[in-house]
Image (cartoon, rainbow, N blue to C red):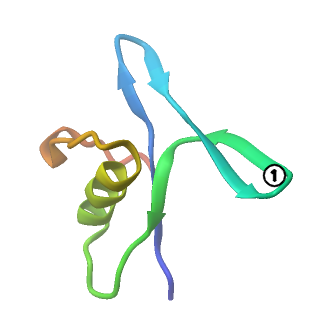
Amino acid sequence: MRRGTVCFLVRDGTVLLADIEYGADDRKWNGIGGWAEEGEELIDAVAREFLEETYIEIDKSTLKKVAE
């Protein structure tokens, strides 16, 4: 089973969203995320994807899981 992640960075009531291009005519504002690699813990995948897509390193201990 393929597992994916999405992360919404919230600071002072403001949410950071990314303008993501899913196709030539398909762009959406969304959280930051992607697919977990084989054997990778979801929390590690969230941190890796966030760094890859935003160049922002997040502290995994500050993440709050809200859904699965």
Q: Residue at x 27, y 39 (%)?
A: 56
Answer with left or right where residue 25 lies relative to residue 47: right
Query: x%, y% of residue 44?
Result: 23, 64
Q: Residue at x 81, y 57 (%)?
A: 24
Answer with left or right where residue 63 lies relative to residue 6: left
Asked if 50 appears above or below 62 in the picture, the reply is below
Q: Identify the element where label 1 is drawn.
A: strand
Query: x%, y% of residue 43?
Result: 26, 60
The residue under label 1 is 26
Q: Residue at x 41, y 50 (%)?
A: 53
Query: x%, y% of residue 19?
Result: 62, 38
Asked if 46 appears above or below 37 in the picture, the reply is above
Residue situated furthest front in the rendering: 24
Residues 21 and 15: in front is 21
Q: How many marks are shown on the rendered structure?
A: 1
Residue 38 falls in image quadrant = bottom left
Residue situated furthest top in the rendering: 12
Q: Residues within 10 Å of mark 1 (few under 14, many from 20)?
A: few
User: Does the image show residue 36?
Assistant: yes
Answer with left or right where residue 29 lies relative to residue 56: right
Residue 12 falls in image quadrant = top left
Q: Which amino acid type is shown beneath numbered disc 1?
A: Asp
Q: Residue at x 38, y 25 (%)?
A: 10
Asked if 57 appears above or below 2 in the picture, the reply is above
User: Does the image show residue 68?
Assistant: no
Query: x%, y% of residue 22?
Result: 71, 58
